[in-house]
Image (cartoon, grey):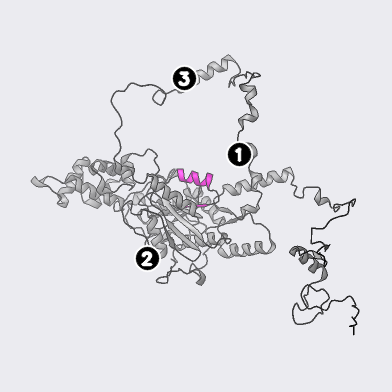
Amino acid sequence: MTKIRKKKDGINKGDHSFNPDRARAAKGKGGVNMRDKSTINRLKMYRGGKAIRNRDGKIVKAAAFQGWVPCGTVSRVEPNRRWFGNTRVIGQSSLQTFQEEMGKVMKDPYQVVMRQTKLPITLLQEKAKHARVHLLDTESFETTFGKKKQRKRPTLKVADMESLVKTAEESTDKYDHEKDRDLEREDEGIRDEAKEPVFNKGTSSRIWGELYKVIDSSDVVIQVLDARDPQGTRCKHIEKFMTDEKKYKHLIFVLNKVDLVPTWVTQRWVAILSQEFPTLAVHASVTNPFGKGALIQLLRQFAKLHQDKKQISVGFIGYPNVGKSSIINTLRKKRVCKVAPIAGETKVWQYITLMRRIFLIDCPGVVYPTGETETELVLKGVVRVENIKNPEDYIGAVLERVKPEYIQRTYRIPEWTDAEDFLDKLARRTGKLLKGAEPDVSTVAKMMLNDWQRGKIPFFVKPPNMEVQDKKTIKNVEKQKSVTEKTEKDVEKQTEENDKDGSVENTDKVGVVQDLTEINVEPKFLEDDIQDLVPMETPGDDDDDDLDDDEEVEDNDEEVEMNQTDRKSVV
């Protein structure tokens, strides 16, 4: 008996998600948001699928994008103008405005370009400036060396004989035979004495390799400067390298040892250096720090800007003995880096965890060879005093730089004629004598150089144009920097808005505020070296600097604590 098949009514009663005819239920798979027929066809197109074959294996229906069109079939392109034109067109005036505004933002160290990969940064770079010169495009082999070579006229900078004579006379007047390196000279047997190896510390290729490792691994680079001589401890070569080759990294100045100079000197130097890069004043101390909360707040703002990264790295670079490792210990409030009041204590770079999203990198001190004399290297603290052969040769420079009143108060010597007389009296007063009651000049000279490097002798370099620079200049600089101040809530809110609507925010500003009057200056300066601070227009107190629960230090032995006193000087 044969079975009678029921005639299909054209409705598939399957319950799988690719069946557009399945019953819609209020609850269950899909619910009210079931796929419609067009969505199912689109998903099948993405999956590709397989060709449908008959019993003989022949293809009845080809797979997606694998079918054949009968011969003679005319294909058409969708009549949409977007297929035939450029959808991103910008006018010349708009392009010029974009180049000017974006150029200002790129040069301003207080503004940060966010998501620069999505911006048409290539419009800022002219091809003529960055294109490589292809010599064969302008001068081929045939026109230069072949049978059809052409003789070209020489390029002259003058148009007539009079201008040529004038140019020759000007170059003759400017010529200095001492600076001419190509001039053959007679060997008189007198040459410059080679430096001792101790004065080449911080200039080896290994140390520079460590420095470039830190720069490449860091998102934010902090250059630590000595507040007693900020310009002398700057490395212009690294700053130029950062601005030319590493524009996407942030460079910050940190003035360390602000407790060794008057407060008005710190304020002037912060105002001067802030015109180039953001500058903070810090006193590195585990027990009584200054600037710790402002520095951590600034790092948290940079972490908010880089939300696309799981964590950011902050590298500390600078001259030897400026306090890079001490600042890291201050941020962690315990000794995580080996520190000492002598140069060259840090040998290799090392990672330190500050928060879950912020890591610190300590770098050995680097000295860029700028032709500094041995005296300058010793007084900057680059060389260890115990390794100097003749330390008494550098005492004269110390006596010239420091006011006599400070020397008399520190060493209780009322008067002296020269450096030798001073060392002789100091050795006799302290009892440093050799056999025959001869003064031990070398020992007392090393004692004095150690006191100099450790800040026991009051000294500071006065800011440039100190007499000319009035209150208005300082006030304008501080006001300009206060405009760049933005709280973390604004940064977070703006970032969330950009993520929602998909728009690209070009720039964002970061900044913190400090109160320099809270600095505890240890040395007692004379009345001539003490001045009143210039009143600043500050935007008000910031939010609390305590760390959030999700930013606590991974090391549970001790949490990072903020200093609530350093609040009112704008970076």
Give the alpha-carbon distance from disc 2 to disc 1, as whole Å.
49 Å
Tag 1 residue: 130
Tag 3 residue: 172
Q: Residue at x 80, y 47 (%)?
A: 85
Tag 2 residue: 334
Mark found first going from the N terminus, 3 or 2: 3
Left/right placement of residue 487 relative to residue 451 reads right
Q: Residue furthest left?
A: 436
Give the alpha-carbon distance from disc 3 to disc 1, as whole Å.
35 Å
Q: Residue at x 25, y 45 (%)?
A: 388
SS class of the residue under badge 3?
helix
> Which residue is more in the foreground, 52 or 275?
52
SS class of the residue under badge 1?
helix
* Mark 3 crowdedness (10 Å alpha carbons): few <14, some 14-19, many ≥20: few
As drawn, 223 above or below 36: above
Q: Which residues are magenta?
A: 237-252
Can residue 270 be seen here? The reply is: no
Left/right placement of residue 512 relative to residue 46 reads left
Q: Amino acid at mark 3?
A: Thr
